[in-house]
Amino acid sequence: MSTTRPPLASQADIDAFIDAVWLEDGLSANTLAAYRRDLTGFARWLEDPQAYAREMADRHGDAAGEHALPVGPAKPLCDAQKADIEAWFAFRHEETRATTANRRLAALRRFFAWALREHRSQRDPCLTLVAAKQPPRLPKTLSEQQVDALLRAPDATQPRGLRDRAMLETLYATGLRVSELVGVRALDVSLNEGVVRVVLGKGGKDRLVPLGAEAAHWIDLYSKTARPELAAGRQSDALFITGRAEAMSRQAFWQLVKKYALLADIHAPLSPHVLRHAFATHLLNHGADLRVVQMLLGHADISTTQIYTHVARERLKALHAAHHPRG
């Protein structure tokens, strides 16, 4: 039978932290709710482990008596030590996936970094804690047929449609991050050499990325016809501009990608980053060297690129199963 829980002594600290990260980063409501839920759970554990164990037993059907619970006075969240966090994680271990444990640890790390900065804590108990191992999350991608349908979705007879076609072609041809794509300046593109210069990409490094003939064709067509019409005499350094001659924002481009995905009859969840994943996966499917893909993507560590080999391998296995007589 549930009972009314007592007020949380650390509630003011949690509220102040949530307000701070919302103001700093504009985090989504779901992320803020997850932070609040994780911090509240740990704070309740610190105040009364026995009551917390009973609550978890009611919720999950666990036998709380099987767990060795800490005994001692209630402790405010800001006074937590490494051993307190380890005890809470050990208590929740059986019903917690690695991804959930790492999310909780991320919330605690962020909270204590803030608490130290605000002089609410004297130490960071998370400094030497290690995240749980979890299997690599395979990036979502599209088939080559789906990409072709997506690229053809904009109406290239209209200035905005031609701009969007050029942006999609560039994204798929280069594997740029969306922030890099919308940041491309007209002077960063050399159609004669067939390359785009990515200025200060992730990690603060510039790189040259080949465009390919198709993307170069659409950029050239857009630059000569649609871009001057959109600019209407106004000056802009950005290559891809809006009707106000301003650089396209990441959020606006994301909305365009979703619109064209529906027109292309692609109903799976889609974001601009999926085209970056498709770029890498399709290169590997066609025999590209992993180191080359690493350089094109601008990955500092090849282990980041290696996850795409798993996607390519799964694609090959699916093709084998579908077409081999003994698949």
Image (cartoon, helix red, strand yellow):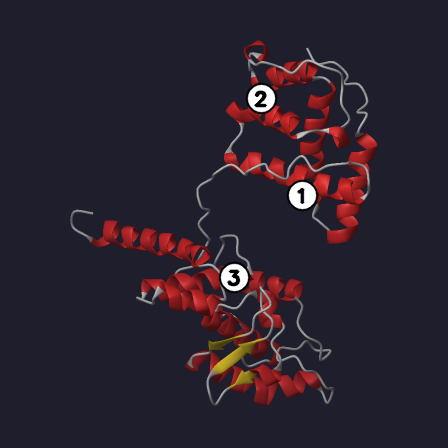
Side (left or right) of 111 relative to 19 = left
Side (left or right) of 139 relative to 70 = left
Image: 36 above or below 319: above
Image: 73 above or below 108: above
Foreground mark, 2 or 1?
Answer: 2
Mark seen at residue 91: 2
69 vs 12, nearest the viewer: 69
* Residue under the image location 73 percent in, 52 percent down: 25
Cα separation, mark 2 vs mark 1, equals 24 Å
- Dot 3 alpha-carbon crowd within 10 angstroms: few under 14, some 14 to 19, many 20 or more: many
Residue 263 percent location from the top left of the image: 52, 64
Give the mark, 1 or 3, whose residue is nearer the N terminus.
Answer: 1
Residue assigned mark 1: 31
* Residue under the image location 73 percent in, 36 percent down: 123
Mark 3 secondary-structure assignment: helix
Side (left or right) of 180 relative to 308 = right
> Amino acid under label 1?
Thr
Cα separation, mark 1 vs mark 3, equals 26 Å
Give the mark, 2 or 3, whose residue is nearer the N terminus.
Answer: 2
Image: 59 above or below 293: above
* Residue under the image location 66 percent in, 86 percent down: 229
Mark seen at residue 272: none
* Residue under the image location 55 percent in, 38 percent down: 130
Residue assigned mark 3: 261
